[in-house]
Image (spheres, helix red, strand yellow):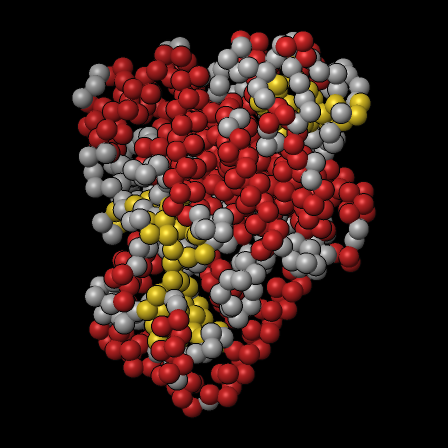
Amino acid sequence: MNRLAGETSPYLLQHAHNPVDWYPWGPDALAAARDGDKPIFLSIGYAACHWCHVMERETFEDEAVAADLRRDFVAIKVDREERPDLDQVYMSAVQALTGGGGWPMSVFLTPAGRPFYGGTYFPPEPRHGLPAFRQVLAGVAAAWRDDRAAVESSGQRLVEALVDHQRLAGISAAGAAWGSVADRAVEAFAAAASALATAFDERRAGWGVAPKFPQSMTIEYLLRRSQGADADPRGLAMARATLDAMAAGGIHDQLGGGFHRYSTDAHWLVPHFEQMLYDNAQLARVYLHAWQLTGATAYFDVATGALDFMERDLLRPDGTFAASLDADTQGVEGATFTWSAAEVRAVLADADRELGEPFVEAYGVTSSGNWEGSTILSRVRSDQEVGARLGLEPAEVTRLLAETRTLLLARRNQRPQPARDDKALAAWNGLAIAAFADAAAALETHEPALATRYRAIAARAADALLAGLRTVDGRLRRSWKDGRATADGVLEDHADLADGLLALYEATFDERWFVEARALGEIILDHFADPDGGFFDTADDAETLVARPRDLQDNAMPSGGAMATTVLLRLAALTGETRYQAAAERALDAVIEVAPRHPTFFAQWLIALDLATMPIDEVALIGDFADPAMAQLRAVTRRGFRPHRVLAGSAEPDASAVPLLQGRFALDGRPTAFVCRAFACRQPVHEPEALEAQLTGVVGSWSAG
């Protein structure tokens, strides 16, 4: 056992039995490096990472490697999901050194924490142009011993470059005033549409070539921009084609409903099999919104399937969500999820021919398989096509396929299952809360029982998360596991949870969620905002690193700054608070030039820009929520996809903590709806038809109120 045995991170605990004398990141490790005058070997990865497992088995279990590390280095192991600040700083360094990056990350630091050499996976023996890890260790140790001045100088120069990079990330584009940015928004949206169309894969959908990642934020942006007078029909077509291709592909677990991390090919067939909470939360939400916008039942099915996967496989006993399921099962990637044709037919043989034949047709199951002799289930024919081939009605095909999937999933559940990383992360849970809350609101009249279940899941997760991770000053810790909160919360933790709580408020009208979300917004402004505009990823009093991280780009999750901007804009619409609007506008200044040129890396910023420049409907519902007339008004506000709307409701508006509700009233004592923009309101209405007309812009004039 080494020093990692006392940690809660499953990734760190996976290395607790290595012969390597690992330290967790912290004062003890840094002091050991200084006192021993040794460089630091910093290894960063995460529990669901396939190549992290490979390097652990091949290299960190090797006694000779452990001896080399013990003699010449202080070895530190970091879970990137617990410490995204460390990951961002040192990944930037590795990318600057090598031109690429990934996990496991292997980086060498001076005792002061300055990076001077790095890479990702290193094999035990030289191969594929990579040196053996022991060769790397020997070379770095020799350089530290024989050419210390050059190593220190290299580290200093790299740190200076990182600091400059972070500083430049906070400088607004030519110091542009917000008015000029707003004036250029139409141009920015047009440029983003052109860039997305150019990069779009017309044959296989999605953007770019293999590997292909699920671009949830890009699709969400296109769904939002598909509405309004300046809508570009190409955007919705690209979004729908990508949603359809992902839903049919092997990246989508055709039996369990969740999504794998990404597709290793351009066809969405062969996934990297890990299943992440953040992917499934974002994909569930975007498929839900696509259903609201288009009415396509297939999108509803995918959205609820992803939500049900999260509930079934990631929900922890305390109500929060676990981080991920591993890519490997018993050391073999994807072993739980792949099939042989014989296995499929054996399961179907237990049923009658009526069940089996449609499934084989729909999923193209052949004796040769579709991946290395095995089958990754993917849809190759629609229900209509299968029905035409077999002489069945499409509805009957749908029923038979559902029954067959249930049989196969039950058989698959008898196999060994991938390990679960059981820590609950604030940011990732915030995304999950938002997805379940949005679904609860959208399904309130469509599927009321399902809406009630999803609403309870979201509320329980929010309660548990705040109870476990909130500190005495209201700030968040990052990770919760085994009754212990670890690591300081970063910007994305506060922003993503605030976004989830705002969605939960709109789904429930329980004002405690609004109050908590607003408190997190204040923390963002007090501790993460840059006085010169924008946001840092770490708080003003966080651990001092070689550079204070500020990552503008979206990655698999939204940029913390972009989500903070989105949250502040929604808070501004609910409160009329100009500080929120001003901070959001200044943050947008920094990206207005670059975001449209690289929209898949800045999609959440484009969502925020859309929110900042489109008219926002501020809807206030006043009256008794038990009144059937109020239920009718609520149903109107839940109908369709309304991304440019905030919603509040209360039976006692004058006592409300939501400024949008204050001063409103139940006209003639009846449930009443107010539709406002910038706190100027249309005539209050009682009838659902009148409310629908106001929300669609058919009738009504604005007046102060």
What residue is shown at x 55% (from left), y 28% (from top)? 506
Q: Position of residue 355 (x, y in %)?
A: 27, 18
Would residue 35 be seen by someone viewing this image from the given angle? yes
What residue is shown at x 35% (from left), y 23% (from top)? 361
Residue 164 vs 50, above or below: the answer is below
Q: Quadrant of the N terminus?
A: bottom left
Would residue 215 be seen by someone viewing this image from the given angle? no
Name the residue furthest bottom: 146
Choose between 184 and 427: the one closer to the eye.
427
Quadrant of residue 705 in the image? top right
Choose between 697 and 389: the one closer to the eye.
697
Quadrant of residue 122 in the image? bottom left
Choose between 52 and 379: the one closer to the eye.
52
Choose between 383 and 121: the one closer to the eye.
121
What residue is shown at x 27% (from left), y 29% (from top)? 409
What count of labels does the image hold?
0
Residue 207 vs 235, above or below: the answer is below
Quadrant of residue 268 in the image? top left
Q: Position of residue 414 (x, y in %)?
A: 19, 34
Q: Position of residue 106 (x, y in %)?
A: 40, 68
Instruction: Specify whether 448 is left or right of 526.
Output: left
What residue is shown at x 46% (from left), y 61% (from top)? 87
Q: Position of residue 243 (x, y in %)?
A: 51, 32
